[in-house]
């Protein structure tokens, strides 16, 4: 399955520039209980101009925190789940995948033009999600099937002008390989973000080091780098504790929400954000290859005085 690159797409990371990434839009919408789970698709908001303000507020919170830190930012397109299964449930044709992805990239690019400054780089990241669990009976069982399933969305995002695509929330190696090969065929930079279970293992059981080694082997190191999605702040250290050579391929971390009351989640509050700063700072110090940090906490519509708590706490931790 391994194929050689004619030329590896260059990911436009700025040397020495940390990036605040991944505001996990759907997770924030659910935590704030403004939407039912069946409605928590950020791309749906684009269909109604009167609801676009909700998205603008989420992105604005992320950019404000990035600017307060003196970092750059990676803006995720609201395209999580825009796939064959989703358009089929809507009763639409597959051509809508192209249309919705173009609209989402245009919307995010417009925000970049508004927020970007000479000293604050902003990258556009096209988000590709795994096939939904409710469609598990149809889920890709091989990398080739995953490639066929995700190819159209990856190609649409690339054609619309994203700087990179990210396979987000990945729990299995085969689907990750399929997304990487789709990006490789299209010629766009790709990042793979794994959702970890206990310790350093994917939820399907593979150790993250084994997953990275297999993907790099079968795709000729197609991913520009890997990200790890952590369920809660106190998992930060556990995820990298047994780091070996594979850790050099991990350049991004996303911190998710801690489960509260079973399936129910709550928004982050100011004390959470301040407490998150020290473990984040320690991890960035211990692993200098980490260049992007983010998570669902970025987009909470917190009061202005709370929005600055994480940047301030990070600067205190660095002192």
Image: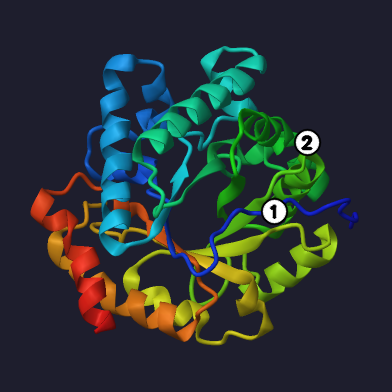
**Residue 139: x, y in percent?**
67, 41
Residue named by callout 1: 10
Residue 238 locus on image (x, y percent): 45, 81
The kind of secondary structure element at disc 2 is helix
Q: Residue 193: in sight, yes or no?
A: yes
Asked whether, in this view, residue 162 is left or right of residue 319, the answer is: right
Q: Considering only vertical position in the picture, is 288 above or below 258?
A: below
Instruction: Give the crowd class for mark 2: few <14, some 14-19, many >=20 residues within 10 Å.
Output: some
* In the image, farthest residue toward the front: 118
Whether residue 91 is situated above or below residue 208 in the rendered picture: above
Quadrant including the C terminus: bottom left
Tell me which label, 2 or 1, sits earlier in the chain: 1
Report the residue at 37% width, 33% height from top: 40
Q: Do the residues labelled 2 and 1 touch (CB within 8 Å)?
A: no
Which residue is drawn at the image coordinates 56% and 27% (left, top)? Answer: 101
Q: Position of residue 30 (x, y in %)?
A: 30, 41
How crowded pointer 1 is (Cα within 10 Å; few <14, some 14-19, many 20+) is rated as few
Which corner quadrant of the image does residue 8 belong to? bottom right
User: Against 291, is 261 above or below?
Assistant: above
x then y, percent, for residue 140: 72, 43
Q: Please state the total of marks drawn on the protein image.
A: 2
Q: From the viewer's perspective, tell me whether residue 306 is left or right of residue 248.
A: left
13 sits to left or right of 313: right
Tag of residue 148: 2
Closer to the camera in the image, 226 or 133: 226
Left/right placement of residue 146 relative to residue 252 reads right
User: Marks 2 and 1: which is nearer the front?
Assistant: 1
Distance CA(mark 2)–CA(mark 1): 24 Å
Q: Indicate which disc residue 294 carries.
A: none
């Amino acid at each position: 399955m391994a194929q050689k690159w004619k030329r590896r797409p260059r990911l436009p990371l700025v040397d020495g520039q940390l990036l605040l990434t991944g505001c996990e839009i759907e997770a924030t919408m659910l935590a704030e209980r403004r939407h039912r789970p069946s409605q928590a698709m950020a791309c749906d908001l684009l269909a109604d101009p009167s609801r676009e303000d909700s998205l603008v507020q989420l992105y604005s919170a992320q950019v404000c925190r990035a600017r307060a830190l003196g970092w750059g930012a990676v803006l995720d397109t609201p395209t999580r789940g825009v796939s064959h299964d989703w358009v089929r449930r809507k009763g639409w044709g597959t051509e809508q995948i192209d249309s919705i992805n173009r609209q989402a990239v245009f919307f995010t690019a417009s925000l970049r033009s508004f927020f970007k400054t000479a000293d604050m780089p902003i990258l556009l990241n096209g988000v590709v999600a795994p096939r939904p669990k409710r469609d598990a009976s149809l889920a890709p069982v091989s990398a080739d099937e995953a490639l066929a399933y995700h190819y159209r969305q990856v190609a649409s995002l690339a054609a619309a002008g994203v700087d990179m695509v990210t396979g987000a929330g990945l729990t299995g190696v085969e689907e990750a390989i399929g997304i990487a090969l789709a990006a490789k065929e299209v010629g766009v930079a790709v990042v793979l973000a794994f959702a970890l279970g206990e310790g350093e293992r994917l939820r399907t059981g593979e150790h993250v080091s084994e997953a990275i080694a297999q993907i790099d082997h079968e795709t000729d190191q197609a991913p520009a780098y890997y990200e790890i999605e952590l369920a809660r702040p106190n998992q930060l250290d556990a995820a990298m504790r047994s780091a070996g050579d594979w850790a050099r391929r991990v350049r991004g971390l996303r911190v998710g929400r801690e489960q509260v009351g079973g399936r129910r989640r709550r928004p982050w509050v100011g004390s959470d954000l301040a407490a998150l700063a020290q473990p984040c700072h320690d991890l960035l110090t211990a692993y200098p290859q980490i260049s992007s940090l983010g998570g669902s906490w970025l987009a909470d519509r917190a009061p202005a005085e709370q929005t600055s708590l994480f940047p301030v706490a990070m600067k205190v931790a660095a002192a």
